[in-house]
Amino acid sequence: MESTRYLIVGAGVTGLAMANFLRSDQYLVLERDEAIGGYCKTIKQDGFVWDYSGHFFHFRQPEIERMLVERMPPGEVSTVRRCSQVYHRGKRIDFPFQKNIHQLEKEEFIDCLYDLWRATAASGENPSSFKEMLLQRFGRSIAEKFLIPYNEKLYACDVQTLDVDAMGRFFPYAKLADIIKNMREPDNASYNASFTYPRGGAIEYVKALEQGVRPGAIRLGEALQGVDLERKLATTNKGTISFEYLISSAPFDRFLTMTALEQNEAAVAARRRRYQYNKVMVFNLGFDRKGWSEPHWVYFADPALSYYRVGFYDNIFASDRMSLYVEIGAGRDADLETEQMRQRVLADLRRVGIIDEHQLVSWHSVVMDPAYVHVTREAKEELEQLRRVLALRGVFSIGRYGGWTYCSIEDNIIEARALAELFNQLEG
């Protein structure tokens, strides 16, 4: 039987970061796929460079960015001032919608501003859901024209079911004074006012993390199948590994099924009810010529359109052919037929004017499952309890899916670093 001190499950950003920050070299990284990167994989096809989806990096801690960039060729990474827009009733306005209502038609602007003033003046109770928060904070018009329909397309669910703080710091809050000031002095800055992106795609950041991993420590094509918490044994499709500590970035609900926790039929059914999520189908599309020249991505709340976001890779590096990623939210049990969805996407792109006589010269699609976890109060409370139970057994579930949260790619690195530092202190 093979043994290791630290068994890391997943060779995405979180798992590779964990391996980078551990002082000990007694670790193994299991990856069920045949390539590293998780959802940060990059497709290079017919001269186009596409990620699985739009993965742009917003670093708040310079030392992390420096660590990664120094491992890449000079000039690989560009810093870009974000241009994001909202498509609404045939026109594009600046993002975020709630700070740019003055760009709407007059009657819509009046409705939004009046409802916003009423919402601000009201002294309502603390909201109990994400939907109630939107209505109380921004008023009915802003919420119903964009914030509610957009997020229901993104999450593919009724946002009444989501926790008030489902998006944490990533939701672009704005006070009435900020919104009014923005009418004269535009300031649409947010946590991602600028972003960095490598010419070779998001995979270049993953490769930079890979450089800090001990040679031979990554096991591709080896999937975790079960965990014996008492005996500290991990079963994979290739054998059994004993461990002292196990660090998993796998989706929390799926990881639980691999342990001895909650294995009866009723518990499994309850877990499925608590840990909700949605899929996202992504089409990467390459066309023979340019299209919209300004935005890096555009948000679409109209329920009649298949996608909720369209991104323009070609506007990052000013290439001469339009290169898009198109994202479609769907329920976790949705049956997504690729060719049918592709034809609908192309029709919807024509409908809004992104393409007209363009020729599609290359394309790729992928379904991210899970994509966005649905952060609810019930799931948050149970997750924290179960994570404490697992930690007492030397098992830690971290990352976006392991922590069942909404976070940035850098947040995953920070969380892995913090846990590794705790282990490093134990090592002495």
Image (cartoon, grey):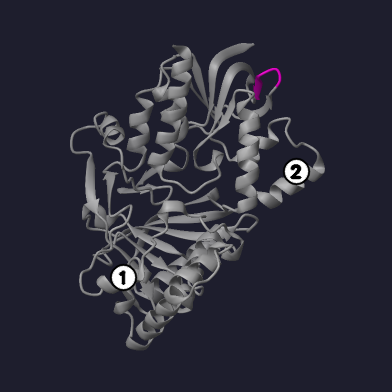
Mark drawn on residue 268: 2
Q: Which quadrant of the structure image shows residue 248?
A: top right
Residue drawn at the location 44% of the way across and 11% of the way down: 428
Q: Position of residue 225 (x, y in %)?
A: 66, 29
Mark 1 lies on residue: 177
Q: Position of residue 288 (x, y in %)?
A: 29, 61
Residue drawn at the location 28% of the way across and 59% of the way down: 189
Residue drawn at the location 47% of the way across and 30% of the way down: 15
Spot the residue most to the right. Answer: 265
- Secondary structure of the residue carrying tag 1 is helix
35 or 308: nearer the eye?
308
Mark drawn on residue 378: none
- Label 2 is placed on what type of residue? Val
- Label 1 is placed on what type of residue? Ala
Residue drawn at the location 57% of the way across and 24% of the way down: 246
Q: Residues within 10 Å of mark 2 (few under 14, many from 20)?
A: some
Q: Are marks 1 and 2 in contact (CB under 8 Å)?
A: no
Residues drawn in magenta: 230-235
Quadrant where the N terminus lies?
top right
Q: How many numbered callouts?
A: 2
Q: Which quadrant of the structure image shows residue 402?
A: top right
Q: Left or right of 408: which side holds 198? A: left
22 or 235: nearer the eye?
22
351 or 340: nearer the eye?
351
